[in-house]
Image (cartoon, rainbow, N blue to C red):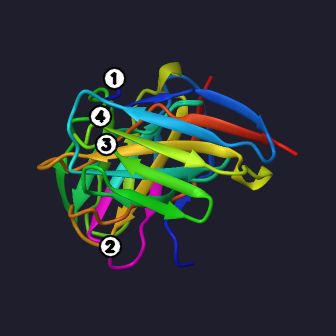
Amino acid sequence: GAGVSQSPRYKVAKRGQDVALRCDPISGHVSLFWYQQALGQGPEFLTYFQNEAQLDKSGLPSDRFFAERPEGSVSTLKIQRTQQEDSAVYLCASSFRAGDNSPLHFGNGTRLTVT
Amino acid sequence: TQLLEQSPQFLSIQEGENLTVYCNSSSVFSSLQWYRQEPGEGPVLLVTVVTGGEVKKLKRLTFQFGDARKDSSLHITAAQPGDTGLYLCAGEQTGANNLFFGTGTRLTVIP
């Protein structure tokens, strides 16, 4: 498809398990963002990539969160030793260029539930 | 902590009514975007405003950026059930890499 694709759509993990969330951005998009959205709230920034470079990871809530985009296209967000407070929708967005009001295109998210 | 506060948080109105959603901050933004998000989907961009005082219209939706570029409003005229959704404002700051999203306004339009 032409849009941002995220997988899986739903993930249930037991507390303490590791999870990996995948994002396929729109082909050719330079910028890629990960956001965390709690139920009924606005998305909160986690991290930003420009091509393969992770330029900003200031929003990652702890060192259990790790993101990569090794070839400048597909990105993976990994959460180690999941906790209940990690339960949220994780949104990926891409844009054609960096900054300059370039519009973000969001995927439909991965809903993570930690039990 | 979110830089942008939206009000009201929830809004339930009858079809045909008008409504206004507010997005406020103590910070200045170089641009401000409005998104609509439906359940199970990602936010979809509605409009971007970049100039203080700017007004943009999109059919029945009117967006305004405050003169000081710290606040914005979204006005919907004659709301339709299809307008139901979560409305999010998001601000971009010069030199920042990311958008700061507001707290969201969940709108329900009752037929």
Q: Chain of mark 4?
A: A
User: What residue appears at the point 62 percent right and 53 percent down from the top-left corner?
Assistant: B41
Question: Decide: marks 1, 4 in contact (CB < 8 A)?
Answer: no
Disc 4 crowd, CA 10 A, few/some/many (<14, 14-19, 20+): some
What residue did someone put label 3 on?
B66
Query: Local crowd at mark 1 within 10 Å, few (<14), some, or many (≥20)?
Result: few
The residue under the point 29% across, 60% down is: A69
Q: Is residue B91 left or right of residue B45?
A: left
Identify the residue shown where x is 62% and y is 51%. Answer: A9
Cα distance between the residues tagged 1 and 2: 29 Å
Depicted A96 relative to depicted B74: above or below:
below
Region in magenta: A22-32
Of badges 1 and 2, the one in the foreground is: 1
Type of residue at label 3? Gly
Instruction: Please name the residue that numbered disc 2 is placed on.
Output: A29
- Which residue in the protein does label 4 denote? A60
Identify residue for label 1: B1
